[in-house]
Image (cartoon, rainbow, N blue to C red):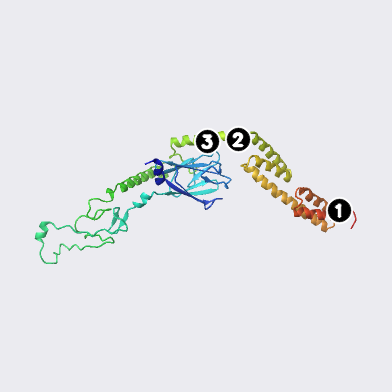
């Protein structure tokens, strides 16, 4: 059998975004490596989260059933269950925070593990060899020893010192002898059988795994350490040398890509236009600032600062147009024709490339009215 089906059967997980711009997104994976980031090339794309890097993190399969998350970003962080990490082992229901997004991690158990779940025996123990839907055959009590049979009186009532063993039918049709007679039934198997719960190899395997997990938790628990652990410290107890090497390799690749980007002519032109737009924004020239930031976005679509100041320039521009319109209307009502002419002229100048705008048409009409009154034609 090839390795791919084994990975598919034994290493499945699902994610659910419970907070952030992509809240409600659910995805399932059955692959050994899943990337997370803002770029479209990732398996989990968080394009609407501005605090997520283009290639932020990677969830990797380690061994046959362990998943590790590795931080690939140089400037942004990852929190796992509220603690900042660089690389961390994920468990079922772990909460991963990347940027403004919180992701809940679910491990899907393989079908074989679900099918072999031990059933609870109502006779007092776990029975891993009895299917839940199939009743067990009735128990036949063993024959009494010859010596006991010879000494037992013939009357139907047994001696007072030896109460009769009454068969007790359980939920599966089994037999339960009185507590005072013979050894107790074996836990986990049919009553009277030589096997039991510990005879099942799968149960032994999961038992050993459980003991190892509890032992590891006890050893690495903060309560067993002499010095209290800093909650803000980066946990590196589960980082392997291979994880560190892979993270360094990815980091070098990202640095190479960034260096090529920063050395390009296109990036330098974007920076020049950004400085120009920012200077116009500070001077109140919001129309020219919008044009400069639009050039930046054409050259560098991922420039978050250019997106922000382009949006702010538009808001400031609209507010300035509205302010001049309000001032012009006030002066027109007071018959201050010179001042209303000046305010309406400002609106027409600001909207000279948008002559179909309703504000432009209204300002032009009132401007002509103020001009006629100023010249004394009315």
Q: Residue at x 87, y 55 (%)?
A: 372
Q: Residue at x 11, y 62 (%)?
A: 152
Relative to 214, is 156 on the left or the right?
Answer: left
Q: Pointer 3 and pointer 2: residues touching (CB < 8 Å)?
A: no
Callout 3 secondary element? helix
Label 3 vs 2, first from the N-terminus = 3
Horizontal and vertical percent for residue 167?
21, 62
Horizontal and vertical percent for residue 251?
52, 36
Report the residue marked by disc 1: 371
Report the residue marked by disc 2: 261
Q: Nearer the viewer, residue 68 or 327?
A: 68
The label nearer to you, 3 versus 2, is 2
Q: Nearer the viewer, residue 329 or 221?
A: 329
Q: Is residue 268 above or below residue 329?
A: above
Horizontal and vertical percent for residue 41?
54, 42
Report the residue marked by disc 3: 251
Q: Is residue 118 above or below residue 39?
A: below
Q: Residue at x 71, y 49 (%)?
A: 316
């Amino acid at each position: 059998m090839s390795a791919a089906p084994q990975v598919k059967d034994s290493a499945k997980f699902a994610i659910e975004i419970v907070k952030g711009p992509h809240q409600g997104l659910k995805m399932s994976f059955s692959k050994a490596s899943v990337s997370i980031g803002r770029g479209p090339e990732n398996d989990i794309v968080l394009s609407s989260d501005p605090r997520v890097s283009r290639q932020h993190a990677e969830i990797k399969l380690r061994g046959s059933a362990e998943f590790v998350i590795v931080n690939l970003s140089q400037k942004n962080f990852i929190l796992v269950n509220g603690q900042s990490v660089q690389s961390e082992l994920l468990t079922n229901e772990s909460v991963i925070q990347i940027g403004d997004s919180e992701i809940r991690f679910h491990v899907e158990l393989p079908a074989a593990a679900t099918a072999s779940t031990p059933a609870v025996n109502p006779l007092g123990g776990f029975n891993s060899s009895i299917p839940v839907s199939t009743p067990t055959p009735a128990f036949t009590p063993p024959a009494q020893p010859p010596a006991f049979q010879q000494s037992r009186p013939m009357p139907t009532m047994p001696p007072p010192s030896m109460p009769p063993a009454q068969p007790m039918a359980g939920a599966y049709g089994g037999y339960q002898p009185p507590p005072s007679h013979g050894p107790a039934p074996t836990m986990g198997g049919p009553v009277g059988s030589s096997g039991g719960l510990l005879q099942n190899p799968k149960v032994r395997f999961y038992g050993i795994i459980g003991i190892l997990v509890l032992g590891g938790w006890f050893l690495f628990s903060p309560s067993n350490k002499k010095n209290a652990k800093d909650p803000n410290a980066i946990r590196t107890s589960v980082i392997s040398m291979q994880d560190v090497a892979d993270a360094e390799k990815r980091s070098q690749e990202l640095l190479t890509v960034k260096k090529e980007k920063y050395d390009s002519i296109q990036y330098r032109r974007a920076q020049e236009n950004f400085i120009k737009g920012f200077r116009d924004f500070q001077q109140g020239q919001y129309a020219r600032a919008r044009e400069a930031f639009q050039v930046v976005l054409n050259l560098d679509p991922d420039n978050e600062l250019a997106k922000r100041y382009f949006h702010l320039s538009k808001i400031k521009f609209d507010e300035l147009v509205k302010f001049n319109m309000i001032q012009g209307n006030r002066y027109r009502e007071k018959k201050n024709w010179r001042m209303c002419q000046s305010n309406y002229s400002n609106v027409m100048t600001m909207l000279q490339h948008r002559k179909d705008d309703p504000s432009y048409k209204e300002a032009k009409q009132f401007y002509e009215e103020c001009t006629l009154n100023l010249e004394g034609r009315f």
